[in-house]
Image (cartoon, rainbow, N blue to C red):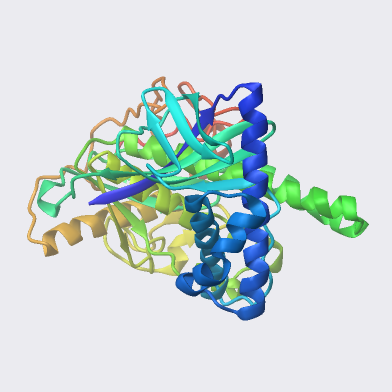
Amino acid sequence: MHITLTSKVRILPDEETKDLLIRTMHAYTSACNYVSVHVFATQTTNKKLLHDELYRDIRSHFALRSQMAESVIRTVVARYKTLTASHEPWKILRFSKPQYDLVWNRDYSLKGDIFSVNTLEGRRKMPFCRPGSSLDGKLGTARLVLKHGKFYLHVSVTHEVTDVTDSAVTNVVGIDRGIRFLATAYDSAGKTAFFSGASVKGKRAHFAALRKELQKVGTPSSRRRLKAIGQRENRWMRDLDHCISKALAEMYPEGTLFVLEDLKGIRKATERIRVSDRYVSVSWPYYDLEQKLIYKAAMHGQKVIKVDPAYTSQTCPHCGRRDSASRDKRRHLFRCTGCGYTSNDDRIAAMNLYSMGNEYLVQSGVSMPLSGGVQSTTPDVRRDPLGGALTSPDVTPADTEYSESVTNAGGVSRPLQGSHKPLLQGVSLSRGS
């Protein structure tokens, strides 16, 4: 199994080389716009035809080398094919930011601590800072970008990882995704971990209110500000998803099977959501978190499956009774109308997903002793993935008389990165029943 990731590499050119790189990137971007005008007019995305028509013009007009001219055509064609695949109306595409797409071992190479790149004046070599992510895999195409006066190389790295077979699974974790808790995980030891979304929801509400005010202004500067705010919020949410998925992958052992709800089509379910809640519910990045967990799990020798989410928050994991009246959405409380089993509704969903993971293994012919489920009496002491032990109150976050005090109860709670509020709360369950 192969996984392709993008690593961000900081390039450290001297002043003379900086000017040369900027000129090369501007020439490349101008050539992309030149080809884009032709593609828009002819509606041709055939790379061979475009090569025959434009290759010599690109080299003569923009002084690009042969491989650079080929890359220009490839870059523009890829953008227009993306436009067609997304079913957007045909329009001319503009390349405004300076960039330079590179081909491994033709336009660039990374050897030792030296970055070698093809420019308008031939090859140039310069040092670079090794990223936190690994460059040990197979390097592919890369993009050189200039941001805030600094040069970065976004390089694709393909890693070969071992497929996790069903027979190799030693632990099952059901993960419910939501808004009040971004993720609620229930594992084979009967332990539960909550990733709070309260501070995240508040910050997104701030962004939404700010956008509303700027939209009322309607000036060119307010529109520029709107675009910047949207990009900032997207970067922040992507970083949160990285932190949560990394914490989940690292807090469980190799051979773990993560069970997620298949939330395909959730964006179309607006008719069942109040108008005032639609922005929060429909724009929540469930898919982004899912994709990041899939590749991080694979890198850690783990596996992710998706199951039907129907009735996971309405079914009692203790007696199996399904009743919508058992769930109180306003109080986030589940109380079975049959046996009286009571817990947080997100935890109930995670427990049912855990059970569905076990059923998946049984159907696959895998039999293994798992101690999870509501019968577990093992004390639940969860380690904060960022350090520090979390204590284990004997109540759930949804119990009415404890709902306020338990929200920030117990242990050490630390921010994930920068200004992030604590996501992994000091709340877990001492027993499953």
Residue 349 x/y as whole percent:
38, 56
Q: With respect to residue 211, does 79 lie above or below? A: below
Q: With respect to residue 182, does 60 lie above or below? A: below
Q: Is residue 342 visible?
A: no
Q: With respect to residue 122, does 65 lie above or below? A: below
Quarter of the image for residue 322 reads bottom left
Residue 129 x/y as whole percent:
48, 24
Q: Quadrant of the C terminus?
A: top left
Q: Residue at x 65, y 52 (%)?
A: 62
Q: Residue at x 17, y 42 (%)?
A: 371
Q: Residue at x 8, y 55 (%)?
A: 366
Q: Is residue 311 visible?
A: yes
- 186 vs 205, left or right, is left
Which of the two residues, 141 or 86, is positioned nearer the viewer here?
141
Which of the two residues, 242 or 20, is positioned nearer the viewer here?
20
Residue 307 x/y as whole percent:
31, 64
Which of the two residues, 64 or 215, is positioned nearer the viewer here?
64
- 173 vs 42, left or right, is left
